[in-house]
């Protein structure tokens, strides 16, 4: 989780308050002092911090509270809401529409992470089924096109650019025209930056916007700059029609809170945050979900969305079989594919209360690779092997499958062992009363324990968390389908 220090301090202050025998004015002030200090340390603007204090005090107004009101809950709720307010700009980003070319132009100062973010943004949407392409309209910096070319190739996103052309407007127009003709749905234009806001940059920016007529302009800014980004964000907004913002480098930087709150104050919605240098280090941003995760409360709505987007809950057959306690290899295949579609394991898991630290960074990738290997092995199985749980996998069968997929027999054994383990788990789930009766209230209450039990360390190591998580997703998705 980004900004975990800040989150820990705030939730610590709230916990301290909850543990007090008497919740009076003094206790409230002490908590607010602690929260304020944490926010100031994260470089949140002093006026915004004061405003938060006042709003919380106004909301809870201890003197006029009727007896019997749960003060702790009320105060926690007020802090939560005010943190959300602080991060809510009151505006929404321009929507992308499927089935037409959406041109999205990225602007921002040099070094703030534009190019990196363009490619991450492309990768994110392409994985969600958008026909996506990148245009490099940075002719200012030497090597800019090579940088984009390299990471676009890695992300397998088509790109356009030129090593020799110096007219950025021309390259932008050509690239966008080309991809429009080829019916791309999302055409992302990376522009050049300058070291500081200067006239040349703004002029070029305006000309490119004029030439490609973007549906949306995204301003990329460096989260390590804290609240000082406020002026910069305003300046860009005044020159071009900034529709939304991506705040980058929020991994492990103390000033991220300041940057996020400052952007909101300019009334530009933050749509994504950058949390690292890798392709998938880009997270959709929504104030409520973010604050929930920040405070370690989990983010069930984010999780349900991820499940929906992955289409996991669109396969009632699997769910039904799991309810009956039977798992076929084909089910496993479908589940593995869904896991891959849901994106990085660690991020999905961080949406669960108290689960943030469960998967160490780095382990997720191993898990993903393992899932991919399993999929390739299952690709060389016959229909009967996939659908019939009674098939015996003897040595010659395993040799055939291993050969067909270019893997060792040991890998096949590995997969089958995993399948066996999961089958057992599923047969246990099949006996679960909640799943049979549809009464999930109990299940929901026990969720965190249940999750950690499913994810015992050995299994986590084996699977990078995929199996237990998938299983749980089934329970969750059915729960939320109502
Ligand atoms: P541009 O000049 O605006 O196009 O910036 P680049 O995309 O070239 O990024 C500048 C540097 O910031 C590169 O070294 C990137 O790897 C790094 N960077 C970009 N986004 C992030 C992020 O979210 N986290 C971290 N840690 N580094 C980032
Ligand atoms: Mg660049």
Image (cartoon, helix red, strand yellow):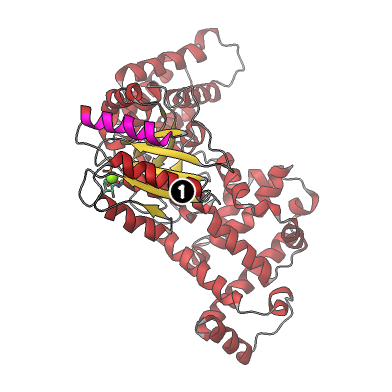
- The residue lying at 49 percent from left, 34 percent from top is 286
Q: Which residues are magenta?
A: 200-213
Q: Is residue 184 magenta?
A: no
Q: 174 or 204: nearer the eye?
A: 174
Dot 1 falls on a residue whose secondary structure is helix
Residue 210, relative to residue 28: is it above or below?
below
* Image position of 257 (left or right of 432): left
* Image position of 259 (left or right of 335): left
Q: 126 or 259: nearer the eye?
A: 126
- Let me know if residue 433 appears in the view: yes
Residue 313, relative to residue 337: is it above or below?
above
- Let me know if residue 251 appears in the view: no
* Image position of 226 (left or right of 31): left
Q: Quadrant of the C terminus?
A: top right
Residue 305 placement (x, y as % from top left): 59, 43
Examine the image and state in which quarter residue 262 appears: top left
The residue identified by callout 1 is 179
Q: Quadrant of the N terminus?
A: top left
Residue 268 placement (x, y as % from top left): 41, 26
* Image position of 437 (left or right of 153): right
- The residue lying at 70 percent from left, 63 percent from top is 428
Residue 232, relative to residue 159: is it above or below?
above
- The residue lying at 74 percent from left, 50 percent from top is 434
- The residue lying at 59 percent from left, 43 percent from top is 99
């Amino acid at each position: 989780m980004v900004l975990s220090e800040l989150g820990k301090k705030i939730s610590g202050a709230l916990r301290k308050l909850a543990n007090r025998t008497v919740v009076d004015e003094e206790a409230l002030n002490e908590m607010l002092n602690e929260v304020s200090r944490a926010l100031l340390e994260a470089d949140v603007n002093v006026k915004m911090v004061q405003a938060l204090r006042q709003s919380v005090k106004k909301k809870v107004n201890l003197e006029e509270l009727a007896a019997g009101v749960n003060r702790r809950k009320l105060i926690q709720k007020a802090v939560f809401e005010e943190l959300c307010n602080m991060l809510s700009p009151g505006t929404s980003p321009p929507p992308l529409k499927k089935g037409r070319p959406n041109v999205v132009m990225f602007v921002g100062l040099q070094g703030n992470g534009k190019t990196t973010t363009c490619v991450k943004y492309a990768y994110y949407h392409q994985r969600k089924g958008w026909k996506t392409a990148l245009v490099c309209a940075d002719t200012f910096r030497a090597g800019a096109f090579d940088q984009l070319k390299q990471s676009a190739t890695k992300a397998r996103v088509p790109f356009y650019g030129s090593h020799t052309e110096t007219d950025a407007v021309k390259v932008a127009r050509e690239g966008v025209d080309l991809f429009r003709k080829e019916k791309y749905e999302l055409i992302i234009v990376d522009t050049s930056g300058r070291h500081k806001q200067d006239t040349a940059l703004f002029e070029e920016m305006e000309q490119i916007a004029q030439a490609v007529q973007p549906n949306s302009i995204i301003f990329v800014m460096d989260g390590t700059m804290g609240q000082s980004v406020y002026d910069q964000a305003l300046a860009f907004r005044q020159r071009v029609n900034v529709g939304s913002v991506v705040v980058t480098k929020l991994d492990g930087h103390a000033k991220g809170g300041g940057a996020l709150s400052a952007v909101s104050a300019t009334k530009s919605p933050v749509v994504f945050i950058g949390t690292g240098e890798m392709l998938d280090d880009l997270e959709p941003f929504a104030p409520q979900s973010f604050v929930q995760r920040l405070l370690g409360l989990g983010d069930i709505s984010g999780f349900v969305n991820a499940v929906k987007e992955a289409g996991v809950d669109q396969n009632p057959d699997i769910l039904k079989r799991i309810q009956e306690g039977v798992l076929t290899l084909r089910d496993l295949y479908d589940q593995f594919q869904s896991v891959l579609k849901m994106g990085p394991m660690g991020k999905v898991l961080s949406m669960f209360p108290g689960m943030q630290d469960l998967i160490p960074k780095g382990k997720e990738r191993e898990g993903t690779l393992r899932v991919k290997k399993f999929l390739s092995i299952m690709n060389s199985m016959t229909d009967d092997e996939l659908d019939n749980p009674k098939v015996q996998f003897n040595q010659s069968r395993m040799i055939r499958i291993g050969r067909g997929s270019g893997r060792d027999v040991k890998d096949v054994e590995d997969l089958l062992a995993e399948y066996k383990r999961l089958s057992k788990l599923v047969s246990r789930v099949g006996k679960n009363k909640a799943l049979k009766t549809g009464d999930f209230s109990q299940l929901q209450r026990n969720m965190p324990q249940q999750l950690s039990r499913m994810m015992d360390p050995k299994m986590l190591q084996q699977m990078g968390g995929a199996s237990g998580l998938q299983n749980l997703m089934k329970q969750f998705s059915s729960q939320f389908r109502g």
